[in-house]
Structures are given as C-alpha cells and as structure tokens.
Image: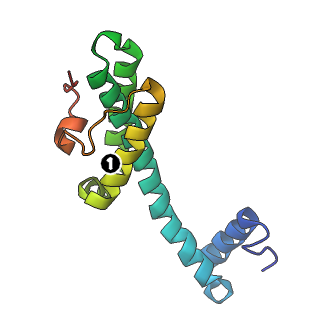
Amino acid sequence: MSATYETDVVAWANEQAALLRSGNLSGLDIEHIADEVEDVGKSEKRELASRMAVLLAHLLKRRAQGANRSASWEVTIRVQRKAVAAHLEDVPSLKATLRDDRWFSGVWGDAVDQATKETGLADFPELCPWPIDQILDPSFLPG
C-alpha cells in the first residue's frame, strides 16, 4: 500500500478498490474502510437535513410574510420537495430519519435560523407546526 488514508484519501480509496476487485483482502485497510462506509450514511443524512432545512425555511417565510411572498419561494419549495422525494427514493432507509425527533429538531432549528436571517423576523414557532406528511405534500403551501 503506497498511499495512506491520512496523506491522500483519493489515492488510498483507489488502491483499496483495486485490492477489493483483485481479491487481495489481506492488503486492505479495514479500519479506514469501515470509517468511510459509515461516513456514506452520515453524508446521506446531511444531504437530507440540508434540503429539509431549506424547504422548511421557505415554508416559514411564506407563512410569515403574507403580502411580501415571493414567487421564487414557491419555486424553491417545489424544487426541494422533489429533491427530498428523490433522495428518499434513492435511500429509502432515510424515511425513518424524518420521524427521528432529535434529528428533526436540529433541522427545524436550522430552518428557523435561516428564515430569521433572511426575513429579519424573530417570532417563528419553537416547534414545527406541520406534520411531515404535510411538509412533503406537493399541494401544501402555508398561509
């Protein structure tokens, strides 16, 4: 093994893939491979969290700003819903994550922070007022 995980992760990954394909299992860096496999799951959760926070922030802005609603918010809502649906289709095990209270609380906090920064308003609800099915419903728009 010439590349190390710490010095060049891309070269290391290519070497590990070649070792796996050749059946040379004794040359594998098992500990770091396990770390990378775990990181794939974390990355998928981060992607879902990011999209959900953007979606929720735009739902909040739409709810809070009645007359100042922007058509671009609805576009963003539509785009994020489609992206979340596609992500959940590609990684169905993430559906359970949507119902994880701790995870959702963090996403909600990110959405409120984003909506607060973008609107200057500070009176957003502490808890999400919508169930997940409503949030993801393509026909739902608050207010």
- 72 or 1, which is in the foreground? 72
Secondary structure state at the residue bearing disc 1? helix
Instruction: List x then y, in percent, for residue 20.
Output: 61, 76
The residue wearing badge 1 is: 88
- Residue 16: which quarter of the image? bottom right
Q: Is residue 110 above or below residue 14?
A: above
Q: Position of residue 121 (x, y in %)?
A: 38, 27
From what the image shows, is residue 16 above or below residue 102?
Answer: below
Which residue appears at 33% of the width and 36% of the height? 56
Horizontally, is 11 left or right of 91 in the view? right
Q: From this view, report whether residue 110 is shown above or below residue 19.
A: above
Coordinates of residue 10 in the picture (x, y in percent): 72, 62
Please tell me which residue is depicted at 19% across the width and 39% down the height of the picture. 129
Q: Amino acid at mark 1?
A: Leu
The picture places residue 67, in percent across and down from the top left corner, at: 30, 9
Q: Is residue 64 left or right of residue 49?
A: left
Quarter assignment of residue 45: bottom left
Residue name at image x 79 percent, y 70 percent: 7
Q: Which quarter of the rendered picture does the C terminus lie within? A: top left
- Quarter of the rendering containing residue 61: top left
Residue nearer the viewer, 100 or 13: 100
